Image: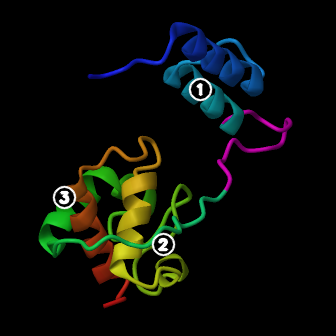
Amino acid sequence: MNRLLPWGFSIAVIAATLVSCGSTSTPSASQSHKKSVAVRHRSKGPNSTNAAPPIKPYSAPPPKLPVGSVAAGARVYAASCASCHGPNGTGTGKGPRLAHPSRIISTYRTESALYVFVAHNMPANNPGSLTTHDAVNVSTYIWHIAGAH
């Protein structure tokens, strides 16, 4: 027989949680996202750029990944990455150099670590929008052009 907690107890727990958070309501996920985007893109003065602060590599242990395809990764790169990193990974004013020699790619010890960063942070205009399959393939391609294999 399932027993439910008395209503009074449940309400007390919810009330205590809200009081400890300092708020009686929580913003929706889209409101929180809008605030974080607004803060990131706020200008700091008349001569500043609206560039986002540098993103640090994701520090969780890299997952075990399937083997990616360099050719498939080149297609994903051309569609999602080349506008910022250049058609051959040579870099632009919008994104750093990824092709050999690349100081950025050399900071990742494994292709899996690069994948984790790409999957969570790229493309910059829509972070995390790549499918797992596309993120694996583009990471394989970038690893390849960086000469890190």
Labels 1, 3: front one: 1
Residue at 53 percent across and 55 percent down: it is 94
Q: Which residue is mark 3?
A: 133
* Left or right: 128, with 131 as reference point: right
* Left or right: 70, with 21 as reference point: left
Q: Which residue is mark 1?
A: 32
Q: Secondary structure at mark 3?
A: helix
Earlier-in-chain disc, 1 versus 3: 1
Magenta run includes residue 2: no
Q: Is residue 26 visible?
A: no
Q: Which residue is mark 2?
A: 97
Please identify the quarter of the rendering in which residue 126 is found: top left
Q: Amino acid at mark 1?
A: Ser
Q: What separation in Å lies between label 2 and label 3 (alpha carbons)?
A: 23 Å
- Locate the C terminus by quadrant: bottom left
Considering only vertical position in the picture, is 6 above or below 115? above
| Magenta stretch secondary structure, dominant | loop
Q: Nearer the viewer, residue 93 or 146?
A: 146
* Left or right: 70, with 43 as reference point: left
Q: Residue furthest front?
A: 1
Q: How crowded is the residue under tag 3: few (<14 C-alpha within 10 Å), some, or many (20+)?
A: some
Residue at 61 percent across and 18 percent down: it is 14
Q: What separation in Å lies between label 1 and label 3 (alpha carbons)?
A: 29 Å
Residue at 80 percent across and 44 percent down: it is 48
Image location (x, y in percent) of residue 9? 59, 16
Mark 1 and mark 3 residues within 8 Å of each other at the beta carbon: no
Q: How crowded is the residue under tag 1: few (<14 C-alpha within 10 Å), some, or many (20+)?
A: few
